[in-house]
Amino acid sequence: MLLIIRTAQHRYIVRREDVATLRAMMRGDDGRREDADPSMIAVELGPLIDPADVSTVQRRHALIIPLRRRNIALLVDAVDTIVEYADVQPLPPLLRERLREPWTTGVLLINDQPVVQLDVRAIARSILLQRTHASEQK
């Protein structure tokens, strides 16, 4: 099963089994989440992939990805639909080798538009590794 998710400017697909929970979250007036949970690291997915993909939506959807001791919440504008059966085309090795981060696993054509499949577990691991490295530098 696949989820189709939307950021401010893009659509992506993710494997449903990689997402433990979907949860709604609200952004406070200062731009931070109102329901801040210290055991969770919340990150906007749009700007993580494309710095110009910044959302202004107040009500967000969080894709909760559990890792060892922390949960990573990838914030998106919407979770559109669930696709039960889809023929995702894997990325060719040459293209996969040229990616800065190994987060893209394939492409699915939806209404003749290519939609990139993201590996949200790899994204969550990268976020946790980056946060751990940043805290060790302090």
Image (cartoon, helix red, strand yellow):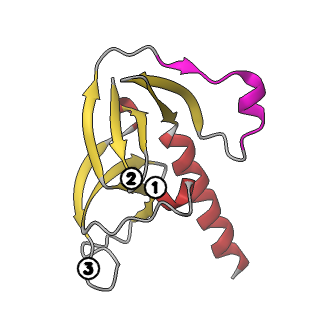
Describe the element under mark 3 as helix, strand or loop. Answer: loop
| Relative to 43, 133 lies left or right | right
User: In this figure, what is the number of numbered marks?
Assistant: 3
Q: Position of residue 112 (x, y in %)?
A: 42, 22
Residue 84 pos. (x, y %): 29, 18
Q: Quadrant of the N terminus?
A: top left
The amino acid sitting under disc 2 is Thr
Graded by Cα atoms within 10 Å as few (under 14), some (14 to 19) or many (20 or more), the crowding at tag 1 reads: many
Which secondary structure lies at badge 2? Answer: loop
Check disc 2: other Cα within 10 Å, few if <14, some if 14-19, many if 20+: many
Pinpoint residue 129: horizontal percent, then vertical percent.
63, 58
Q: Please give the name of the residue rendered at 23% of the width and 53% of the height, measured from the top-left corner.
A: 23
Amino acid type at image mark 3: Gly
Circle number at residue 45:
1
Q: CA distance from mark 2 to mark 1?
A: 7 Å
Which dot marks residue 7?
Answer: 2
Q: CA distance from mark 1 to mark 3?
A: 18 Å
Q: Quadrant of residue 50?
A: bottom right
Q: Which residues are magenta?
A: 88-99
